[in-house]
């Protein structure tokens, strides 16, 4: 059975800096998630994270324990957890994007001014993230973050 979990959290800056931290998180996420059949996306605006995770209940619970103990973020807030029929992020072991001006149009379309969309319905958060990742794929400069 497949589940989807969506959460937000607040970034805690260490000595490495936000972009370097983000790249490091994506790198270990891709390795671990791929081998545990977890897919999803991680969106970062240099002060907060929004992550969508898809996988079995056991895989998600185990991963959450890893993630929740990570000192690079606090205020971990699960927005929703639900059973789903299929993966939306099947091609991404962990798609990643950092907020940029290129996303303004998508933010506006979903009526999001600044913060991540924790008050949107689940479907809207999912399509919002899909649109961001699809846009990133078309921007050569951000390729390194998509993977
Ligand atoms: C916002 C956030 C999201 C993360 N997402 C994942 C993830 O999806 N998969 C994963 O394995 N680690 C994720 N991590 C990293 C884990 O908390 C942990 O640092 C990492 O799994 C340890 O990997 P390593 O043993 O390769 O160093 C995330 C960390 C943060 C701060």
Image: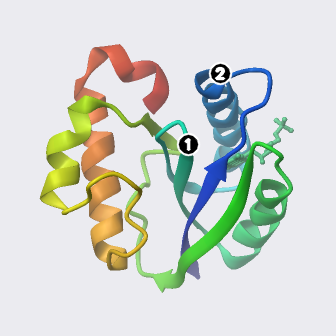
Find residue 122 and report its horizontal and vertical position in percent.
37, 77
At x 43% / y 65%, what residue is drawn?
Answer: 87
Which comes before the other along the chain, label 1 or label 2?
2
Tell me how far mark 1 sits from mark 2, CA to CA. Answer: 13 Å
Q: In which quarter of the image is residue 81?
A: bottom right
Q: Which of 4 and 90 is in front in this view?
A: 4
Describe the element under mark 2 as helix, strand or loop.
Answer: helix
Work out whether 95 lies above or below 127.
above
Q: Which of 138 and 98 is in front in this view?
A: 98
At x 78% / y 30%, what residue is drawn?
Answer: 14
Describe the element under mark 1 as helix, strand or loop.
Answer: loop
Q: Name the residue under label 1.
A: 47
Find residue 104 and report its horizontal and vertical position in percent.
20, 41
Q: Which of 100 and 28 is in front in this view?
A: 100
Which label is found at residue 20? Answer: 2
Q: In which quarter of the image is the N terminus?
A: bottom right
Find residue 42 and report its horizontal and vertical position in percent.
52, 47
Residue 4 lies left or right of residue 32; in this view the side is left
């Amino acid at each position: 059975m497949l589940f989807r979990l969506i959460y937000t959290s607040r970034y805690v800056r260490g000595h490495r800096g936000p972009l370097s931290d983000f790249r490091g998180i994506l790198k270990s996420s891709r390795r671990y998630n791929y081998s545990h059949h977890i897919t999803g996306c991680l969106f970062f605006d240099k002060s907060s994270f929004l992550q969508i995770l898809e996988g079995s209940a056991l895989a998600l619970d185990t991963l959450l324990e890893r993630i929740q103990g990570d000192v690079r973020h606090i205020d971990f807030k699960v927005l929703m957890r639900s059973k789903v029929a299929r993966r939306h992020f099947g091609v991404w072991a962990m798609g990643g994007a950092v907020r940029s001006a290129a996303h303004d149009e998508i933010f506006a379309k979903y009526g999001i001014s600044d913060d991540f969309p924790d008050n949107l319905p689940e479907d809207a958060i999912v399509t919002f993230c899909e649109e961001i990742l699809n846009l990133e794929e078309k921007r050569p400069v951000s390729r390194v973050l998509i993977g």
